[in-house]
C-alpha cells in the first residue's frame, strides 16, 4: 500500500541550530502539505504545494521557515534558526489534487525537540 | 472563516459501551467534514468524510457520523467500543479550497 514517507522520525536539536525535514508523497499526488502539530492541539497548515508551486503559505513563519518542492515530487521543510517554541510534530500529507473533498494522506511525522 | 469545536478533550468509556465524540463546525460555505484518528507518534488516518451526499456517513472500524446542518454538528459514534479504539480523534472542516482546519482533538480512553 502506498504511503507518505517522512524522515527523520525524531530530531533533537539545540536552539539556533538549523534543521531540515524530508517528505516523499504518494506517487502521483500533485498536492503536498506540511502541517505543524503542537502537543495537545490539532495540526495547523504551514504550507501547501500544487506540483512545485506554493498555493498557501500564509501561516508559515517566513523569517525562519522555508519549504521547497523543486521537481514537484518530494519536499523539504527547513527551520533556521530553531527556537524552543518550534518543538512539535511536523506532518506531511499528500492528495491527488487540491480539492476540498479529496482525502489527504498523512505520513508518520517528524517529532522535533528543541533544547 | 471556518472553525471546529470538539467538546471534551478527554472521553472515557467502558469496553463495549457506546462511543460519542462531539464536533461542531462553523463555515461560511457548505462544508466538507472529516474525522481522523491518530495513534501515539503516528500520522493521521482518515476514518470517514462528509462531502454533501448522504448525511449519515459510515467509516472504517465501525465508526459513523451524522451531518446535521441545523445543529452545525458532525458527531462521531461507534456502538461498541474496543480497546483498540483508544487514540486521539480529530474533527476537521474544509472549505471548497481544500484547506483543512482541525479541532483540538479528543483523547478516547477505553477501560475494561
Image: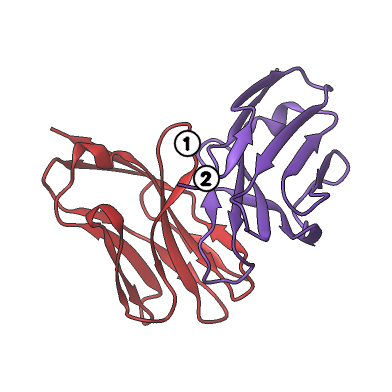
Chain colours: A purple, B red
* In-image side of B87 versus B15 (left or right): right
Q: Can residue B111 be seen in this view?
A: yes
Q: Which residue is drawn at 66% across and 53% down?
A: A33
Q: Residue B42 carries which label?
A: 1
Q: Which mark is residue A40?
A: none
Q: Can residue A89 be seen in this view?
A: no
Q: Is mark 2 on a helix, strand or loop?
A: loop
The location of residue B20, given as percent across then percent down, is 25, 56
Neighbours of disc 1 within 10 Å: few (<14), some (14-19), many (20+): some
Considering the image in quadrants, where does the C terminus of chain A appear?
top right
* In-image side of A2 versus A54 (left or right): left
The location of residue B39, given as percent across then percent down, is 40, 37
* In-image side of B20 versus A40 (left or right): left
Observer-side mark, 2 or 1, equals 2
Q: Residue at x 76, y 40 (%)?
A: A76
Callout count: 2
Residue A85 vs residue A12, the one in the foreground: A12
Q: Name the residue under label 2.
A: A3
Q: Residue at x 57, y 71 (%)?
A: A100
Q: Residue at x 77, y 49 (%)?
A: A60
The chain letter for the residue carrying disc 1 is B
The location of residue B25, given as percent across then percent down, is 46, 68
Amino acid at each position: 500500500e502506498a504511503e507518505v514517507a517522512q524522515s527523520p522520525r525524531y530530531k533533537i536539536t539545540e536552539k539556533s541550530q538549523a534543521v531540515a525535514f524530508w517528505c516523499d508523497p504518494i506517487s502521483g499526488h500533485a498536492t503536498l502539505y506540511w502541517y505543524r502539530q503542537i502537543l495537545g492541539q490539532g495540526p495547523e497548515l504551514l504550507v501547501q504545494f500544487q506540483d512545485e508551486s506554493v498555493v498557501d503559505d500564509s501561516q508559515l513563519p517566513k523569517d525562519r521557515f522555508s519549504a521547497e518542492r523543486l521537481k514537484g515530487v518530494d519536499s523539504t521543510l527547513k527551520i533556521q534558526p530553531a527556537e524552543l517554541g518550534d518543538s512539535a510534530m511536523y506532518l506531511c500529507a499528500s492528495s491527488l489534487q487540491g480539492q476540498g473533498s479529496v482525502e489527504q494522506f498523512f505520513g508518520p511525522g517528524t517529532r522535533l525537540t528543541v533544547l | 472563516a471556518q472553525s471546529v469545536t470538539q467538546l471534551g478533550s478527554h472521553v472515557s468509556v467502558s469496553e463495549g459501551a457506546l462511543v460519542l465524540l462531539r464536533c461542531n463546525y462553523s463555515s461560511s460555505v457548505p462544508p466538507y467534514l472529516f474525522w481522523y484518528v491518530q495513534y501515539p507518534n503516528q500520522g493521521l488516518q482518515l476514518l470517514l468524510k462528509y462531502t454533501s451526499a448522504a448525511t449519515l456517513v459510515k467509516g472504517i472500524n465501525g465508526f459513523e457520523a451524522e451531518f446535521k446542518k441545523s445543529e452545525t454538528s458532525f458527531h462521531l459514534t461507534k456502538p461498541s467500543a474496543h480497546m483498540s479504539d483508544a487514540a486521539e480523534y480529530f474533527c476537521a472542516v474544509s472549505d471548497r479550497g481544500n484547506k483543512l482546519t482541525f479541532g483540538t482533538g479528543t483523547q478516547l480512553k477505553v477501560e475494561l
